[in-house]
Image: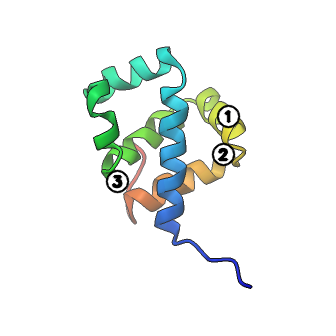
Amino acid sequence: MKKSQRHPGEVAEIVAIQALSFVAGEPERLGLFLSESGIGPETLRSAAKDPQFLVSVLDFVLRDDETVQAFASASQLPPTTVAAARQALAGPGSDFS
C-alpha cells in the first residue's frame, strides 16, 4: 500500500501549527509574540486558520537563530524545513520581513 503524499502547502501549515504550539508552550515567548502581533490570546485559535498569520508565526520563530534551533529540536525537523514551510505558505516571490 502506498503512503499518501501531502501537498507542500499542507505540510507547511502543519509545521506552522507546530511552531505556534511551540511558541505557546513558553509564557514569555508567547507574551512577546502576542505583543508583537497585536492579537490577544482569545483570538489565537481563530487566527491560526489564516495562512498569513501562520507566516507571521514562522517569521517570529525564524528571526532568531536560537529560537529556530530550539523549535527544530523540539519538533525533530531540520531548521531548513522551517524556512521552507514559511516560503511555501507565503508563496513565490515573498521575502522574509
Q: Residue 92's spot in the image, x, y percent?
A: 40, 66
Give the residue number, with chain letter if any, for mark 2: 79
Q: Quadrant of the N terminus?
A: bottom right
Category of crowding for the residue at label 1, using alpha-carbon neighbours closer than 10 angstroms: few (below 14), some (14–19), many (at least 20): some
Q: What SS does tag 3 mark?
A: helix
When the figure is inspected, residue 54 is found, relative to residue 29, above or below; the finding is below
- Judge by depth and name the residue closer to the eye, 83 or 14: 14
When the figure is inspected, residue 60 is found, relative to residue 34, above or below; the finding is below
Q: Nearer the viewer, mark 3 or mark 1?
A: 3
Q: Which mark is residue 51?
A: 3
Q: What SS does tag 1 mark?
A: helix
Residue type marked 1 = Gln
Task: State how far apart marks 3 and 1 are (Cα).
Answer: 23 Å
Residue occupying image coordinates x 29% and y 42%: 47
Q: Residue 86's spot in the image, x, y percent?
A: 47, 52
Residue type marked 3 = Pro
When the figure is inspected, residue 28 is found, relative to residue 11, above or below; the finding is above
**Residue found at the very far bottom of the displayed protein:** 1
Q: Quadrant of the C terminus?
A: top left
Q: What SS does tag 2 mark?
A: helix
Residue type marked 2 = Pro
Task: State how far apart marks 3 and 2 are (Cα).
Answer: 20 Å
Do the numbered discs 2 and 1 sit on residues whose CB atoms are within 8 Å? yes
Residue occupying image coordinates x 44% and y 22%: 30
Q: Residue 12's spot in the image, x, y percent?
A: 51, 57
Give the residue number, with chain letter if any, for mark 1: 69
